[in-house]
Structure formats: structure tokens, C-alpha cells
Amino acid sequence: MDGSCEKIFAEVIVFPGGCLMGSKIIGMSRPHEPHQPFFPFGNPFRMLSSSHLSRKLLILSKTFEETLAERLRRLNPKDKGEILSFSWMKLAMESLCETHNDIKTLITDLELPVCDWDEKWLDLYLDVSVNLLDVCIAFSSELSRLNQGNLLLQCLLHNFESNSSKLFIRARSSLDGWRQHVNSKNPRVENCCTILDKLVKSLDLPKVKNSAKGKVLMSALYGVKVETIFVCSVFAAAFSGSGKKLLDLDVADKFIWARAFTSLQTSVNGEIRNILSSGRFPVLKELEAVDTSVKKLYPTIQDGVNPVEEEAFQNSVSDLGRRAEKLSQGLDLLTKEVDSFFQLVLTGRDALLSNLRTSTDSDGRLEGNGIERV
């Protein structure tokens, strides 16, 4: 390793998930923070025997793949009725965050400095990350839209507290507004198909020459992208109610996690297609439950409440209130997870761009690798 490369490594290691580690920057710390000891794992410049290095890389790769396989198995629910529930979708987004964080750990263990990154690796990460940010924005906008629908539900439930005929007219108006709102399309979600296609094309990883560490990294990134594309396509299909958003990925058997992924994809995509082919809409479990209660109440609101039916009517209103509350809680929890994933991708991208800029020489090229300033 030449002097310029050694200098860069001593100052920064870039993690795609957003973590920086070095003698000056650790975990996104700022330059004015106290100096922290570097190389907690030992001196990375110490020469390792080829047999030791090969064994180490094999263990790192195997550990990453086995962890991913177990994570994918946990996502495969025994009860298919849980698919497209907010609890399952929250678990899926948590899984994505964990997998992207695992890449940070892997790069730490690989001791792979930025000056050793091939330009194609950097381009790949930057392209994928910006597409993921666009997908997150689309999902957040849809969750926000569904939360706005909750305001109509709350207005509806408030109007039910009175037997006034005028308030019943308002309730009917709120009910109509909610149904129109839920059945409307979100252009951002509809456009996810194009973005997902770009992510699928990114699965063709650049060839790695003369870098055993690079091969381990690219192999791990492939697993990360496969899980990411799968989860994002499921979310897009759920939010849009369209099976066209679902993607079926073919994964080679050579990966430890391949069988777990294929089983998960077959189970989840198959169930979603069954739901959509039945004509059910909305497909989100908690949203469908609210819609069922609304449909039950709608005829009563139109015709008026018969005194004989008063008790049944109040029970229906209470049922709608409980389901609306469950929907609200699910939306809040899922929104937080999507925001967490967005921040994870954003900080990783910002960290990489920042260190590419600060690691350039006066000619505007990355020392040791000849990468143009971004």
C-alpha cells in the first residue's frame, strides 16, 4: 500500500450504511470531538499470510450469508394471513435496516479503505442509493396520504356521537370522502415500477479483478440488493394494489441464503397475487378491516337509524373506532421504520460523497485511485 493510500485509510473508512470510522471521524463524529483510538482490531497494515487471509475472508462471507438467510426465514410467516399486515411490513423494513447495517460491519472487518474501492463500485453504490431514496420518498408520501384519510375517519366518528340529522349528513359526506381518498392513486407509488427496474439492472455486479476483499464485498452487496428489491416491490404492490409491481428474482443456488429467499419470495408473492386476483381492495390488512366496517355502516347512514337497530348501529360504530385506531397505530409504526431506512441510506450516501471530496488532492482526483471529484 503506497503512502497516499495509507494516509487515506488512516483517516477514513466509508460504510455504505452511513458510518464513518477513522482516527478523525468515528460514527459520524465531528472534527472537533475528542481524539479516539484507531485500529481497535489491530494494525490493518500488518502483512497476513495468504492462507490466513483466505480463511478470514471465507469466514466473513459465510457469516454474512448465514445471517441474511436466517433473517429471510424470519420474514416468511407461518400464517399467510399476516402478509401485508402492518406488523409484517414493519418487520420487513426492520430486516432491511439490519441487513444494510451488516454491510457496515462487513466493511469494517474487511479493512477495505476507500482508496482501494474500484470506481465502478462507487458508481454502483451512488446510483443504487439515489434510487432507494426515491423509493422511500414514494412510500412515505403514501403513508402520509393514508394518515390524512384517518382525519376523515375521526371526523366521521365524531359525527356519530350525535343523533342530529344534520350531523348524519356530515357523517355521510365524511364517509364518501374517505372511500374516494382510499381508492385514489398515488402517482409517486405508480412510478416506483420504473425505479425498481433500475434496481434490478444493478444486480449485474461489476467484475472484480485482483481483489479478494472486493469479491466478498460485491457478493454481500448482491444479497443486500436482492432483499431490498424484494421488500420494495412488495410495498409498491401493496400500496398500489397492482401485481405488476411484484418482481420475481432468480438467485443462484451458490448463495447460502438462496433457498430461504426463494421460499420467502414464492410464499409472499404468491399470496399477494391470490389476494389481488380475488378483486380485494384495499389489500393492506388493517386498511381492509376499516373498509369493511365502513361498508357495513354506509347503508344505515343513508337510510337513517331505526330505533330497533340502534344497539347494532352503536356496536358497528364502536367496531369502526377500534379498527381505525389500529390502522392509525400501524401507520405510525411503519412510517417510523421507513423514515429510519431513508436516514440510513441518506447518511451513507452523504458520508461517501463527503469523504470523496475531502480525500481529493489539488488536481481534483482521489489520491491513490484516480477517481474524479463528485
Image (spheres, rainbow, N blue to C red):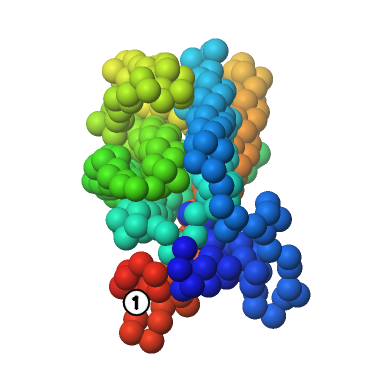
- Please tell me which residue lies in front, 180 or 4: 4
- Residue 127: image x %, image y %? 32, 56
Disc 1 residue crowd, few under 14, some 14–19, many 20+, Cα 10 Å: some
Using the image, determine if residue 163 lies above or below residue 113.
Answer: above
Q: Name the side, left or right, on which 318 lies relative to 103.
A: right
Count every numbered label the image shows and give the total. Answer: 1
Q: Name the side, left or right, on which 114 lies relative to 60.
A: left
- Residue 366: image x %, image y %? 38, 73
Q: Residue at x 45, y 46 (%)?
A: 213
Quarter containing the C terminus: bottom left
Q: Name the side, left or right, on which 158 lies relative to 345.
A: right
Q: Is residue 225 visible?
A: no
**Quadrant in which residue 310 is drawn:** top right
Disc 1 designates what residue? 365
Q: Residue at x 43, y 71 (%)?
A: 356
Using the image, determine if residue 252 lies above or below residue 130.
Answer: above
Q: Residue at x 52, y 68 (%)?
A: 6
- Judged from the image, the secondary structure of the residue bearing numbered disc 1 is loop
Q: Name, please, the residue furthest toward the bottom.
A: 362
Q: Name, please, the residue furthest toward the top.
A: 78
- Residue 129: image x %, image y %? 39, 54
What amino acid does circle 1 point to? Arg
- Please tell me which residue lies in front, 294 or 115: 115
Q: Residue at x 64, y 72 (%)?
A: 24
Q: Is residue 129 visible?
A: yes
- Please tell me which residue lies in front, 171 or 259: 259
- Residue 11: image x %, image y %? 57, 70
**Quadrant in which residue 177 is drawn:** top left
- Please tell me which residue lies in front, 89 or 309: 89
Using the image, determine if residue 114 lies above or below residue 102.
Answer: below
